[in-house]
Image (cartoon, rainbow, N blue to C red):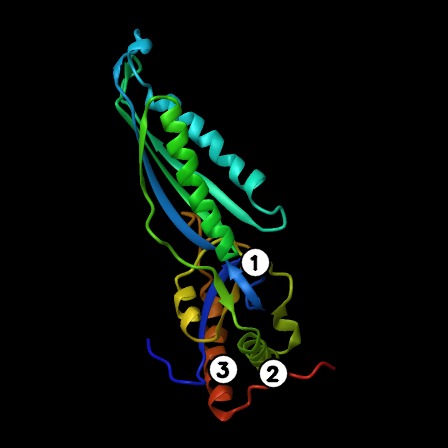
Amino acid sequence: MRVGPGEGVFGLDNWPGIPAGQFAFLEGPAMASVDMMVIRIRGRGGHGAKPHQTVDPIVVGANVVLTLQTIVSRNIDLLQPAVVTVGSIHGGSLPNVISDSVELKLTIRAFDESVRQTIRARIIDLVRDQAKSFGASAEIQDPTGYPVLVNDPTQTAFARSVAQRHFGESRVDSSLKPITASEDFAFMLEQRPGSYLFFGNGDTADLHSPRYDFNDAIIPDAARYWVHLVEDFLSGNTAPKASS
């Protein structure tokens, strides 16, 4: 999508946990970056009865999982939110055979770019050093993921004023905190100022849960909000509503 000078970009997501029909807005870093790594540790397989003749990659992998949990607690400022999650570990197929390799898949989330890069660098160093200390080796796939989603304060104030002006102050929820999930709309906000806002789906299961249930009743007001936002933006009615 191309936008011209002075224009803004806006996105909206329905959000479980916010009361149905309520609008919520976040200025600045609103959703975390996300990077996904795949780590393959290669050892030397063999018979489970003769572990001294092998380099057990599952033992290495287990140590790696525990070591990765020290990054946030020992390398990141405790006032900076960050997450390292090992979501998948696979290795071996039989109880009496030591496999040649084990694969770990993990995600990294942060709200600050320098924190994001520190975590990625520490993971690479720790994984390689851990593997080497056991006589194993490690291959790391480290593709660049999604950046931090940063909402422009001015555009967010405008987006909030649209909800206040057309739906009333009571429809604006002020309890939402920065979200550790991630969103590719962040790439658009890197190019132009704008805001990604949230519309309450009610007390339902989280997004991506098999129990999630989209609330059809919120569709009309969400659609009306977009019409009001475009009309106000194009008419120049962009000043936030004055406090009463």
Q: Nearer the viewer, residue 131 or 239?
A: 131
Compared to 28, does 192 lie above or below?
below
Disc 1: CA contacts within 10 A as few (<14), some (14-19) or many (>=20): some
Check disc 1 and give the amino acid type: Pro
Residue on which the image places disc 2: 165
Relative image position of residue 56 (x, y in whole percent): 33, 19
Disc 2: CA contacts within 10 A as few (<14), some (14-19) or many (>=20): few
Compared to 226, does 178 lie above or below?
above
Label of residue 230 in the image:
none
Q: CA distance from mark 3 to mark 2?
A: 10 Å
Disc 3: CA contacts within 10 A as few (<14), some (14-19) or many (>=20): many
Check disc 3 and give the amino acid type: Leu
The answer to whether mark 1 and mark 2 are in CB contact below 8 A is: no
Q: Earlier in the sequence, mark 3 or mark 1?
A: 1
Q: Earlier in the sequence, mark 3 or mark 2?
A: 2
Query: Which quarter of the figure is the C terminus placed in?
Result: bottom right
Check disc 2 and give the amino acid type: Arg
The answer to whether mark 3 and mark 2 are in CB contact below 8 A is: no
Q: CA distance from mark 1 to mark 2?
A: 24 Å
Residue on which the image places disc 3: 229
